[in-house]
């Protein structure tokens, strides 16, 4: 773990996943309630896992401008596990996962190389491609940029930020993914 992340995550007598970050756990609980009536069985478990991973990534990015590779890798592990459970519903869930992740990373990589977003954000967008599919991930990216634009415009208007102020993108990517999975599941 990097020194930057370790120092940002230090809390007295609190663990990283259990008591150190109550916000992601509250978000997971809210998603359980939201999806509880629409999902069943294993689908609900996957929603909870993604909710926890995305919300934790968003919080870490807000605190230290870093998207932890371990959490992104955990998200890919959940996506692979979900693909195993979806094999009877679809002809090629692994191919869909790989194509979604690869194309989303290919879209985000030039933006990361141009310093328009961070490499962690590019990896998180690839995770969205694996979790939501290509169409869902593109929709979530559009929503994320729209939300980020609205927040940045408000911060600029209120003089709380300047044009050169860095804004973490992972919270917006997480919000876009949550909106797509909650309200546009057919994508």
Image: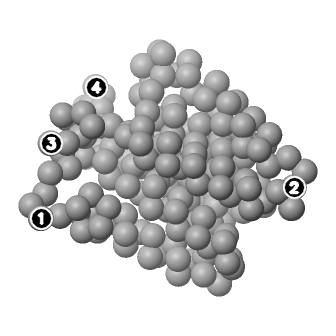
Q: CA distance from mark 1 to mark 3?
A: 14 Å
| Label 4 secondary element | loop
Q: CA distance from mark 1 to mark 2?
A: 45 Å
Query: Where is residue 39 shown, x and y percent of the image?
Result: 68, 77
* Residue 145 vertical placement versus 20 (above, below): above
Q: Which residue is mark 4?
A: 164
Quadrant holding the N terminus: top left
88, 186: nearer the viewer? 88
Q: Which residue is mark 3?
A: 7
Q: CA distance from mark 3 to mark 2?
A: 44 Å
In the rendered structure, the answer to whether residue 45 lies left or right of residue 20 reads right
Task: Tell me which numbered mark, 2 or 4, is placed earlier along the sequence.
Answer: 2
Q: Would you say the residues marked 1 and 2 are in contact, meaning their CB atoms lie under 8 Å apart? A: no
In the rendered structure, the answer to whether residue 80 lies left or right of residue 54 reads right
Q: Which residue is mark 2?
A: 90
- For the rendered model, the colour scheme is one colour
Task: Tell me which numbered mark, 1 or 2, is placed earlier along the sequence.
Answer: 1
Q: Which residue is mark 1?
A: 13
Q: Would you say the residues marked 1 and 3 are in contact, meaning their CB atoms lie under 8 Å apart? A: no
Q: CA distance from mark 4 to mark 3?
A: 25 Å
Quadrant holding the C terminus: bottom right
Residue at x 20% of width, y 49% of height: 9
In the rendered structure, the answer to whether residue 134 lies left or right of residue 145 reads right
Q: CA distance from mark 2 to mark 4?
A: 46 Å
| Label 1 secondary element | loop
Query: Where is residue 144 shown, x and y percent of the image?
Result: 52, 45
* Residue 109 vertical placement versus 61 (above, below): above
Residue at x 52% of width, y 62% of height: 49
Residue at x 24% of width, y 68% of height: 19
């Amino acid at each position: 773990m990097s020194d930057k992340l370790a120092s940002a995550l230090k809390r007295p007598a609190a663990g990283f996943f259990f008591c150190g970050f109550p916000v992601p756990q509250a978000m997971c609980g809210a998603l359980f309630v939201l999806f509880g009536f629409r999902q069943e069985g294993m689908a609900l478990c996957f929603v909870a896992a993604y909710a926890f991973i995305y919300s934790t990534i968003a919080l870490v990015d807000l605190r230290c401008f870093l998207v932890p590779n371990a959490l992104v890798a955990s998200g890919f592990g959940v996506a692979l596990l979900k693909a195993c459970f979806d094999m009877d519903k679809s002809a090629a869930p692994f191919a869909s996962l790989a194509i979604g992740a690869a194309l989303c990373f290919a879209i985000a990589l030039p933006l990361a190389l141009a310093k328009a977003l961070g490499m962690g954000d590019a990896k998180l967008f690839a995770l969205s491609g694996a979790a939501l599919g290509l169409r869902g991930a593109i929709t979530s990216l559009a929503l994320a940029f729209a939300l980020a634009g609205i927040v940045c415009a408000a911060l600029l208007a209120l003089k709380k930020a300047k044009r050169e102020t860095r804004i973490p993108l992972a919270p917006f990517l997480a919000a876009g993914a949550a909106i797509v999975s909650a309200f546009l599941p057919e994508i």
